[in-house]
């Protein structure tokens, strides 16, 4: 089938559109001709991740152009941070990626610590590592539900979202909050583990493992799921660097990159795990890779419980938060979140306010440049599943 | 890294080279050489990953500092390329032909700081502020508090304090907020 602006696809319902590396933008189509339809998917739509929208141009059922629109969640976080004290920013940073606030807390704290030259106690590094892995587990459980739901498997969505609540219970015990924990602060963490936490955490990890086995049987062996996700939105390896693709989206096509291994931080160099990779980065492969990484997460949490010191300081000596003086400096810190490289770039000028913070979220490229390229040539019915398979969070795009 | 920096100093006249940490070095390059240098780093030195592109507003000096963060996956090193441009003549060479994601950053910088990147695709399209008619909001002279007060006005029963002054009074009530 011939599409406008020189693109071709093998059939009206394409499931294997390979992204072009042509950086040129397509010419607008003539809507007045009556041959094409413009359709908005989102910002309020069950098949969209968070609040964003896709402006789709369709030729029949086939997408011939896609434009991502963000801004529905823009609260100017980076601007707000420039006029708040360092500690006040904690109420802001955790809201930048709602399902994964912990990565924001960690990176913001770590950036402040690096510029100030603060060393954190060993126990705090372990508590932070476990907290980040628990966050990864909660986020992946939410994502599996989204991916199942996008292809009509709401049973899986109900299972995982319900089980995520048990992980949130653990967070509540550990930090006092279920979603926005504000647990990781410059100098360490706010508290150690409560009595009996280890036993309850192990019990929930055992249950999660069983749940993942069930999900593998029900979802990944399901004929409909396979038929709809295999060959959908393939990311070829040559697209990885030009588009800045990171995390499971890149690993699913065999690119062995994971910041936890490549540039270990916190206690990751003391944990046993391998980078999971795939071969063909289509929606199925990416989903299966994330399932394996969810299992890996459970193993990492158990290892943290086995190896972390249960006594000792969890917070370095810090002055009163209202009197923090962060010296002038600049740094870029990053961590591997569920979607890949998440980073904080911070510039300070020695005053009581931060000069500039830039938040680098993986969705910035995955949901815009990559999404717009991959959507072309696919069927309108697959757009929701494709979007979830890229695992995007809009708030980290508009910040 | 030292060899590379020496070569960049010689060929591109980079200065202000600072090792921020073992895996991150930053330096400054003139606007005219920036695109060629970044292309060279990508094609010949293995800095194939553009982590991000952003801007810092130094209103007191009348400049914007553009920051291109590049990463080399093999050497596990990052380079922060700083480029100073005038706040008054906010034009910068586009790098959308180097990375397919770069135009998104440039579109955002156009909206948030008013910097122009001639030739960059879809530059005029709104990024996340639909129908914005004020000055670009990430510029330092844009006051968010003043904007919200003007735009949304006073609401009965709503009262706000400057957090720092308020906390001083809360913490040191007997000293009238004097922390000494």
Image (tube, rainbow, N blue to C red):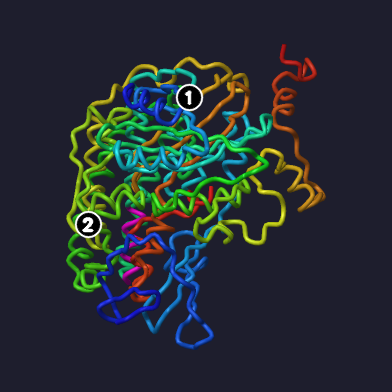
Query: Looking at this view, is A25 or B108 the one in front?
Result: A25
Residue A135 quadrant: top left
Residue A269 quadrant: top left
Mark 2: few/some/many CA within 10 Å (<14, 14-19, 20+): some
Q: In this rendering, would A48 be left or right of A248? A: right
Does the magenta-highlighted stretch encompass residue A114? no
User: Mark 2, mark 1: which one is toward the viewer?
Assistant: 1
Q: Which residue occupies the extreme bottom position in the image?
A: A34
Which residue shows up at 47% across the image and 67% down it?
A54
Q: On screen, A198 above or below A6?
A: above
Q: Which residues are magenta?
A: A141-152
Q: On screen, A179 above or below A314?
A: below
Query: Looking at this view, is A264 or A29 the one in front?
Result: A29
Q: On screen, A214 above or below B141?
A: below
Numbered circle sitting on residue B15: 1
Confirm whether circles 2 and 1 share one chain: no
Q: Which residue occupies the extreme top position in the image?
A: B180
Q: Quadrant of the N terminus of chain B?
A: top left
Q: Which residue is mark 2?
A: A288
Residue B79 pos. (x, y %): 39, 32
Q: Are marks 2 and 1 in contact (CB under 8 Å)?
A: no
Distance in Å between CA atoms under marks 2 and 1? 47 Å
């Amino acid at each position: 089938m011939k599409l406008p602006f020189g693109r071709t696809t093998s059939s009206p319902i394409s499931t294997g559109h390979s992204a072009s590396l042509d950086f040129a933008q397509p010419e607008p189509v003539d809507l007045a001709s009556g041959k094409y339809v413009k359709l908005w998917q989102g910002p309020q739509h069950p098949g969209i991740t968070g609040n964003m929208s896709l402006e789709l141009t369709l030729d029949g059922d086939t997408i011939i152009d896609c434009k991502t629109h963000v801004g529905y969640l823009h609260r100017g976080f980076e601007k707000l941070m420039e006029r708040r004290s360092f500690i006040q920013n904690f109420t802001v940073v955790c809201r930048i990626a709602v399902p994964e606030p912990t990565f924001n807390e960690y990176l913001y704290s770590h950036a402040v610590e690096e510029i100030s030259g603060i060393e954190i106690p060993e126990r705090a590094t372990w508590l932070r590592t476990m907290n980040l892995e628990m966050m990864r587990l909660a986020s992946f459980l939410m994502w599996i539900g989204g991916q199942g739901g996008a292809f009509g498997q709401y049973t899986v969505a109900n299972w995982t979202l319900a089980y995520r609540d048990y992980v949130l219970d653990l967070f509540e015990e550990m930090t006092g909050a279920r979603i926005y924990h504000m647990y990781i602060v410059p100098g360490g963490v706010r508290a150690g583990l409560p009595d009996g936490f280890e036993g309850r955490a192990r019990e929930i990890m055992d249950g999660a493992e069983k749940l993942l086995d069930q999900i593998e049987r029900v979802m990944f062996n399901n004929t409909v799921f396979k038929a709809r996700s295999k060959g959908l939105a393939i990311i070829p390896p040559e697209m990885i660097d030009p588009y800045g693709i990171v995390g499971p989206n890149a690993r699913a096509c065999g690119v062995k990159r994971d910041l936890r291994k490549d540039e270990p931080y916190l206690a990751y160099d003391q944990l046993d795990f391998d980078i999971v990779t795939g071969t063909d980065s289509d929606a199925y492969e990416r989903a299966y890779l994330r399932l394996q990484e969810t299992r890996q997460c459970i193993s990492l949490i158990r290892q943290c419980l086995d190896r972390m010191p249960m006594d000792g300081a969890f917070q370095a000596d810090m002055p009163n938060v209202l009197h923090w003086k962060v010296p002038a400096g600049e740094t870029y810190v990053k961590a591997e979140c569920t979607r890949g490289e998440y980073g904080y770039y911070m510039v300070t000028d020695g005053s009581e306010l931060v000069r500039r913070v830039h938040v680098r979220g993986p969705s910035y490229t995955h949901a815009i440049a990559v999404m717009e390229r991959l959507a072309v040539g696919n069927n309108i019915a697959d757009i929701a599943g494709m979007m979830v398979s890229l695992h995007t969070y809009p708030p980290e795009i508009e910040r | 890294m030292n060899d590379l920096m020496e070569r960049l100093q010689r060929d591109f006249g980079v200065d202000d080279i600072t090792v921020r940490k073992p895996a991150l070095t930053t330096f400054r390059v003139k606007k005219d050489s920036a695109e060629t240098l970044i292309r060279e780093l990508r094609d010949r030195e293995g800095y194939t990953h553009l982590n991000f592109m952003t801007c810092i507003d130094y209103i007191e000096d009348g400049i914007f500092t553009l920051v291109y963060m590049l990463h080399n996956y093999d050497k596990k090193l990052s380079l922060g390329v700083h480029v100073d441009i005038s706040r008054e003549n906010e034009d910068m060479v586009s790098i959308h032909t180097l990375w397919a994601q770069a135009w998104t950053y440039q579109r955002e910088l156009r909206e948030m700081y008013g910097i122009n990147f001639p030739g960059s695709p879809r530059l005029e399209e709104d990024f996340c502020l639909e129908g914005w008619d004020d000055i670009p909001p990430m510029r330092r002279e844009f006051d968010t508090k003043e904007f919200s007060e003007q735009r949304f006005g006073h609401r009965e029963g709503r009262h706000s304090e400057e957090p720092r002054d308020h906390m001083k009074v809360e913490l040191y009530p007997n000293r009238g907020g004097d922390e000494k």
